[in-house]
Image: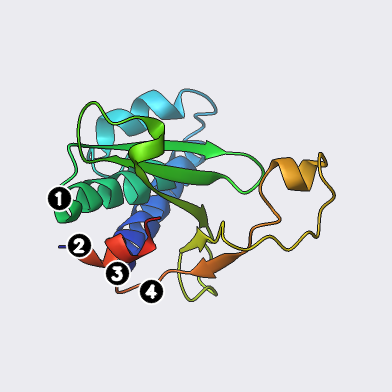
Amino acid sequence: MRTLRDLFRHYQIANERVDQEIMRLRYEGVDEGFEAYLAKCLPESEYPCDWVTMLAKPIGEQIKQAGGFQRVEVLGPMGIGARVSFHCYKNAGDSIQDIQVMTVEPCLTDLSDSPLRVVDYSTNTGRYAPGTTGDVNGLNHPCRPIDPRTAGDGWLQYLS
């Protein structure tokens, strides 16, 4: 099973390949139509190259397998923090009150310890007043890094 670090490295390599192809096309005088060309010349596993497709969706599959969930919805990105929520259903008929949830926020720089951080909804810093943009976007709830070695059932510890 691929760790968060492995998934992120694959994402970085794919991003580099996309950037190289775009630079090559621009050098050849092509200014438009990159998407169609990239979709044809790059492997499906590398394009489109976005963090939800390359990190969040594979993590959702790992959570589904490890937790024995019937369904895991990967929702987002949403808001200023580009947060993605994983809604995990044990049974097909589960209501929203009966599911387990994990919300993550990207931190996709090489300088970060981990490319994803889990949102801690049990803490409210009160930094942003009610109804403000920061409050509405959940920024009163701090994030903590996810261990980059996380894979498989390791994801279950972050569900609430």
Helix, strand or loop status at disc 1: helix
Q: For the residue marked with disc 3, what is the amino acid? A: Thr
Height in image: 77 above or below 109?
A: above
Report helix, strand or loop for mark 4: loop
| Mark 3–mark 2 CB contact (< 8 Å) | no
Q: Which of the two discs, 2 and 1, labels the residue nearer the N terminus? A: 1
Q: Is residue 152 above or below residue 97?
A: below
Q: Can the viewer see residue 3?
A: no
- For the residues labelled 3 and 2, the Cα–Cα distance comes to 7 Å
Q: Position of residue 80 (x, y in %)?
A: 67, 44
Q: What residue does disc 4 label?
A: 147
Task: Judge left or right: residue 149 versus residue 1.
Answer: right
Q: Mark 1 = which residue? A: 65
Distance between mark 1 and mark 4 Cα atoms: 19 Å
Q: In the image, residue 81 lies at what x, y percent?
A: 62, 49
Q: Residue 150 has which mark?
A: 3
Residue bearing mark 2: 152
| Amino acid type at mark 4 | Asp
> Quick one: label 2, few (<14), some, or many (20+) residues within 10 Å?
some
| Secondary-structure class at tag 2 | helix
At x 34% / y 41%, what residue is drawn?
99
